[in-house]
Image (spheres, grey):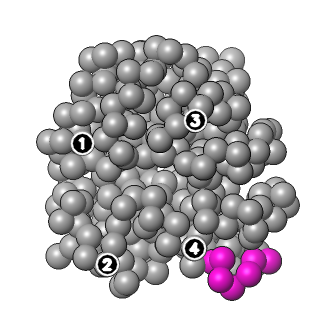
Amino acid sequence: MTLALDDLVAIDVHTHAEVSRDGHPSLSPELLAASAKYFGAHGHRQPTVDETAAYYRERRMAAVVFTVDAEHATGHPRIPNEEVAENCAEHPDVLIPFASVDPWKGRAGAREVRRLVERHGVRGFKFHPSLQGFAPNDPMAYPLYEVIEELGVPAVFHTGQTGIGAGVPGGGGIRLKYSDPMLVDDVAVDFPELRIVLAHPSFPWQDSALAVATHKPHVHIDLSGWSPKYFPPQLVRYADSLLQDKVLFGSDYPVITPDRWLADFEALDLKPAVRPKILKHNAARLLGLDTTDSERT
């Protein structure tokens, strides 16, 4: 069975693989606990990729799945990208594999990016500047961007505050400044064909994210990590107008469920024609999906 776009209710562009096949978590227990507390998600299970597939299949949704490689900054071993891709390949009707390569790995990381796309069917890459401890416009990361741009797949950048490390002394060493979307503006200039997603409402830099997305033609915004009832009013206004073709549904599952997100999304004051764009069509276009896709998935 392959991904059939016409049968889908929505495409969630932002979900996490939080645990490996052998039970290895994506973050240290301290950082995971801080994130759960921040999101009010105490006791939430860390679903396997197979469980995520079943969850989204039941809801007639597709989901982009990734982990975060932050080995340099955290010292915590990552979940293997190959494992995530292989697991997603077992569920091509609902799962779209992304990957994460620590930019501190330099040209070795760039070679991994190419291998993941060409050999493992990865469809995009996730960066978390605060967790990975780098500024997006640091030339250190440019070898990775060069390959991602060449291969024509999207790059997702966490922006704004993060629940990871919240409340831990010193924020667990995580520096919020690296997730200012204006740093990604430099990336959009230096890699003009790179398709970029600014993840999350970018508190406290929401206006900066809107400015970058309206100015740079290949920059999008995903709406993950927040319930829509807490969206800043200017984000809703732009999503309903100037950015209606560049805003994407994302939940941040499992810390926020698509059920909760979609229920609150219904209450937003949006034009009827905009809703399906945000929920599915903008993501389908960005990801290069069509009604007969996933021969490529």
Horizontal side of residue 174 vs 103, given as left or right: right
Closer to the chain start, of discs 4 and 2, is: 4
Horizontal side of residue 166 vs 61, given as left or right: right
Residue 143 location in percent, x, y? 38, 21
Q: Is residue 148 visible in the rendered structure shown here?
A: yes
Give the CA separation, mark 4 to mark 2.
16 Å
> Residue 294 lies in magenta, yes or no?
no
Residue identified by numbered label 1: 117
Closer to the chain start, of discs 1 and 3, is: 1
Q: Residue furthest right?
A: 233
> Residue at coordinates 39% horizontally, 28% vertically from top-left?
146
Name the amino acid, label 3.
Ala
Residue 45 location in percent, x, y? 43, 54
What crowding class fits label 3: few (fewer than 14 Cα within 10 Å), some (14-19), or many (20 or more)?
A: many
Contact between marks 3 and 2 (CB within 8 A): the answer is no
Contact between marks 4 and 3 (CB within 8 A): the answer is no
Residue identified by numbered label 4: 277
